Amino acid sequence: MELETLGDPTGGPPIRLNWQRFSYAGKFVMTNTGKGLFRAGAPGDGEFDESVVAAVAFNEDRTDDRTAWLRYVTVRRDRRGEGLGARLCELVSDDLLDSYDRVKIAVNNPFAYEALYKAGFGFTGETTGIAELVLQRPHDADAAAYRTGLTRYRERDLSEAERSFLDGRTEPPDER
């Protein structure tokens, strides 16, 4: 699979993803974001773009023209757990860093937090209004910042799977 980029941070074409196979499918029909995709095969002409296995939307920060944001990362349900979302975020941010000083992403669970650390993102200490932790590339390799993020998740009402995942984690994972 290779990265396909559609549009740029100011906008791009709509992508119709099957809402039964992808989280956030409706966010990809918007034209005010660019899209990064991993495809398995050529796009078809059906109602949904069945060739997409992972997608991320991206846009420019509304108040800082040196910052780009990754939004709405989604991986097809049958391909989750393969690291496709984090790898896609890494490649899209590599491209964006040619034009921007930093790329940020807000994450709402410890699984995404760790996966994106492996992809080169680090916790900024910031949260969004809906309590997502903000990560960015590039970042200082700061183990204390990583642990602060873990603590923020541990203070939340977590699922058993999330609690189990966090048990014993104290040090940042190795980046790829």
Image: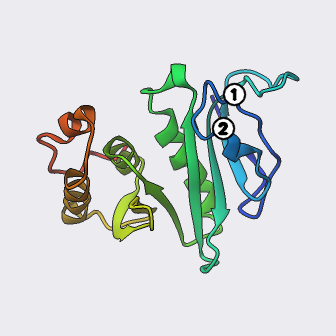
What kind of residue is marked 1? Answer: Asn
Residue reaching furthest to the right? 45
Q: Is 23 positioned to the left or the right of 175 in the image?
A: right
Residue at image point 40% right, 56% down:
121
Q: Position of residue 117 (x, y in %)?
A: 35, 50
| Marking on residue 25 | 2
Say above or below: 12 vs 43. Answer: below
Q: Residue lying furthest front in this view?
A: 157
Do tag 1 and tag 2 residues touch (Cβ < 8 Å)? Answer: yes
At label 2, counting other C-alpha atoms closer than 10 Å, the crowd grade (few under 14, some 14-19, many 20 or more) is many
Could you tell me which residue is drawn at 61 percent across and 80 percent down? 63
**Residue 55 at what x, y percent from top left?**
63, 39
The residue nearer to you, when weighing 65 against 120, is: 65
The alpha-carbon separation of the residues under discs 1 and 2 comes to: 6 Å
Name which residue lies at 45% across and 68% down. 129
Answer with the quarter of the image where residue 166 lies.
top left
In percent of width and height, residue 36 lies at 66, 45
Q: Secondary structure at mark 2?
A: helix
Q: Earlier in the sequence, mark 1 or mark 2?
A: 1
Q: Toward the viewer: 29 or 143?
A: 29
Give the side of residue 77 with respect to residue 157, left or right.
right
**168 or 164: which is nearer to us?**
164
Residue 88 to residue 96: above or below: above
Crowding at dot 1, Cα within 10 Å, few <14 / some 14-19 / many 20+, comes out as some
Q: Which residue is mark 1?
A: 18
Specify the quadrant of the image occupied by residue 50.
top right
